[in-house]
Image: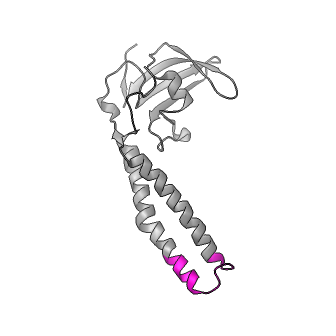
Amino acid sequence: MKPGQDLKNPLTREGFNRIAEEHRQLLEVERPRIVENMATAAAEGDRSENAEYIYSRKRMREIDKRLRYLTGLLKDAQIIDPRNIRSERIGFGATFTIQDEEGQEKSWTIVGMGEADADQGTISWKSPLARAVWNRRIGDLVTVHRPAGPLDYEIIDLHYAGRRIPT
């Protein structure tokens, strides 16, 4: 089975809520504030040399671009609760620990696009690492192909929402 073959746009409930709140904040607070700034700056005269107007236009484009991205993430979102998953294999919502050839361990949780944050230990379900471990079990060896070269890992732990999978 290919990674996430039956998934369309999966998100955790927490990720969905964070993305929806950012969308709301940009649409209802930030964008109207920038529109107001643009109108005020435009009323001051020559727009070509008006730094406030130029900045506001640039910021408006950034906000609109981000809103389109967030709308795409929220559209047809499939909310998955890892607490409801009963599997011995790695899939969406799994938290797994891998060990490299030097014995270094790292834990990751597979989440949806737009909610991944490597600093927080979360990776997108479409990332190379998630693809390499998808549908694997504790004890399996995997190779992650990356531009800098392949890395080999062993899966040493797996759980869903704190519920450990027996080995």
Residue 119 occupies which quadrant of the picture?
A: top right
Q: Position of residue 120 (x, y in %)?
A: 51, 40
Q: Position of residue 128 (x, y in %)?
A: 56, 29
Query: Is 51 part of what is drawn in magenta?
Result: yes
Q: Is residue 52 above or below residue 130?
A: below
Q: Position of residue 104 (x, y in %)?
A: 61, 23
* Viewer-side residue, 47 vs 112: 47
Give the residue at the far bottom of this rendering: 44
Q: Residue at x 44, y 29 (%)?
A: 95
Residue 47 occupies which quadrant of the picture?
A: bottom right
Instruction: Indicate the colouring scheme.
Output: one colour
Q: Is residue 151 above or below residue 32?
A: above
Which quarter of the rendered picture does the N terminus lie within? top left
Q: Residue at x 46, y 18 (%)?
A: 136
Q: Residue at x 52, y 57 (%)?
A: 65
* Viewer-side residue, 148 vs 167: 148
* Viewer-side residue, 111 vs 34: 34
Q: Is residue 46 above or below residue 144?
A: below
State left or right for residue 29 relative to residue 104.
Answer: left
**Highlighted magenta segment, given as a residue range:** 36-52
State left or right for residue 166 relative to residue 127.
Answer: left
Query: Is 84 part of what is drawn in magenta?
Result: no
Which quarter of the rendered picture does the C terminus lie within? top left
Q: Position of residue 32 (x, y in %)?
A: 45, 71
| Number of dots carrying numbers | 0
State left or right for residue 25 relative to residue 103.
Answer: left
State left or right for residue 35 relative to residue 12.
Answer: right
Q: Is residue 82 above or below residue 156?
A: below
